Amino acid sequence: MDVHVSVMLHEAVDALAVKPGGLYVDGTLGRAGHAKEIIARGGRVLGIDRDDAALQAVAKMNLEGLKAVKGNHGDMAGIMAKEGLGEADGILLDLGVSSPQLDQGERGFSFRADGPLDMRMDRAGGLTAADVIRDSSEDDLTNIFRTYGEEPHARRIAKAIAGARSGHPITTTLQLAALVERTVGRSGAHHPATRVFQALRMVVNDELGELQRALSGGLGRLKTGGRFVVITFESLTDRVVKRFFSAHAGKMVSLQQGGERWEGDLPRVRLVERRAAVASDEEAASNPRSRSAKMRAAERIG
């Protein structure tokens, strides 16, 4: 089922405060759900995605007002320069995995369908999840699961993988999912391999590095008064966004000689909302993927 429902669609585009004729960068174009809404409100969109399947699907839509290019959102500043574009009126990042990517077993993102342990968003090259599982030491796997998946049983799972792969390569999603379940057991609503799959996906696609580059590079290409909106699905990525926006929002520091001065990273931003927005109860009920979503927005100021 090659269908993707954009999470927090109207909330995200509302937060962008779209201006007719304005230029907006959708750094995670996907199936262009947010881009179509931006265009419907009068904006022009530069859409960036590294997934060829997504770009092919968007090309068939023939959307007027959209220029779609292949690339990583971490490179958006360079892509904008290459396209001859100046500063943007708004930037949007909808992070995580799309429904089509999860639904296609051969992409290797999900433990719900059997497929090769791939997990590359750009299948043109680079390490796969199977490569990481095969070549990483037990200590490295422990660090990956602990750092990128916040997995409490990281050491046990890494040790089990190291033992199992010595006798038989771990190359498919269901192999890995079953191994994790045998190792730590199953309780609660979430599959015990959820954090392990998240960690592998984030490492394979350098998601934290891409996010950090996108935030710093994008903010540098944003007009004064422009909005930067980010939707995350993991606590790890949400913390990165929160800390970045907070650092650029800065704070007023009292001076010994009296008065105060602003202290923080440049360029300055204003937080559109102090707390992250979450999906409505109605959306959470109709689209389970939205339940973990958090949206933060900041506006660049002089």
Image (cartoon, rainbow, N blue to C red):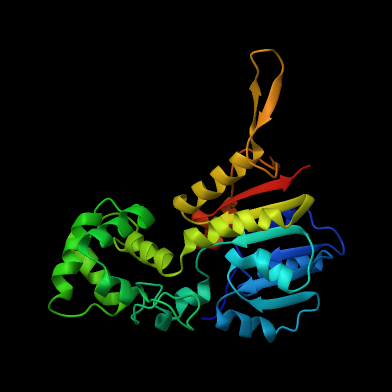
Q: Measuring 26% from the left and 68% from the top, which residue is drawn there? A: 136
The residue most toward the right is: 20
Establish if 4 lies above or below 138. below
28 sits to left or right of 138: right
Image quarter (top left, top right, bottom left or bottom right) of the C terminus: top right
- Along the line of sight, the residue nearer the viewer: 24 or 58: 24
**Residue 37's image quarter?**
bottom right
Count of numbered circles in the view: 0
The image shows residue 245 at horizontal and vertical percentages of 61, 44
188 sits to left or right of 216: left
Q: Measuring 41% from the left and 70% from the top, which residue is drawn there? A: 204
176 sits to left or right of 54: left
Q: Measuring 24% from the left and 77% from the top, which residue is drawn there? A: 170
Q: Measuring 23% from the left and 71% from the top, which residue is drawn there? A: 178
**Residue 31's image quarter?**
bottom right
Q: Is residue 11 visible?
A: no
- Along the line of sight, the residue nearer the viewer: 122 or 284: 122
